[in-house]
Amino acid sequence: MRLIILALLLPVFAAAQSKGDTKITATPSDTAHLFSKLVTLLYTEDYIVKVEDSTHGVIVTEPKMLKQYLNPTLRLKLTVRANTVTITGEFNSNLKTAYGSESTYEPVINRGMKGSVYRVSWDEMDRIAKIIGATSYGK
């Protein structure tokens, strides 16, 4: 009985987010004209597309300021392969150090407390992925 329950729950655990994840794979239900749909989605969500290379299946956005406590900026990279879209990102906390130097872009990683620049950036990336389709997570 326990094996049956475990076997039924395994797909749920496989798709769950884990601390340290850096990429989200979205599987859309409709893949017709997928590349152009993704570009349209990003514009609809107030992103500006910087690179749009359908030959290599890559879309990169300009940094977008997220409306959160520290106003981090986020840029996304979408890689389209067959029936899946892999999303990664980089964020900048836009903080200046005591010495006047500015922060640099860091990879988006699933970590941090609610409201932190890490979590805000991850949640935005996850929100976009869920609009695209069913999601899975990985490093």
Image (tube, grey):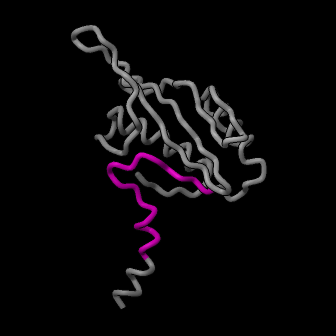
The question of residue 38 being in magenta is answered with no
Asked if residue 30 lies left or right of residue 26, the reply is right
Rendered location of residue 76, percent (x, y): 53, 35
Q: Residue at x 30, y 14 (%)?
A: 96
Magenta region, residue range: 9-27
- Looking at this view, name the residue that lies furthest to the front: 56
The question of residue 16 being in magenta is answered with yes
Q: Quadrant of residue 133?
A: bottom right
Q: Residue at x 34, y 35 (%)?
A: 115
Quadrant in the picture for the N terminus: bottom left
Rendered location of residue 64, percent (x, y): 52, 25
Q: Is residue 126 above or below residue 133?
A: above
- Looking at this view, name the residue that lies furthest to the bottom: 1
Q: Is residue 90 above or below residue 20?
A: above
User: In front: 135, or 67?
Assistant: 135
**Number of dots carrying numbers:** 0
- Looking at this view, name the residue that lies furthest to the right: 32
- Looking at this view, name the residue that lies furthest to the top: 100
Asked if residue 25 lies left or right of residue 80, the reply is left
Q: Residue at x 40, y 26 (%)?
A: 105
Q: Residue at x 60, y 50 (%)?
A: 85
Q: Is residue 7 above or below residue 46?
A: below
Rendered location of residue 22, percent (x, y): 41, 46
Q: Is residue 136 above or below residue 54?
A: below
Rendered location of residue 16, percent (x, y): 41, 60
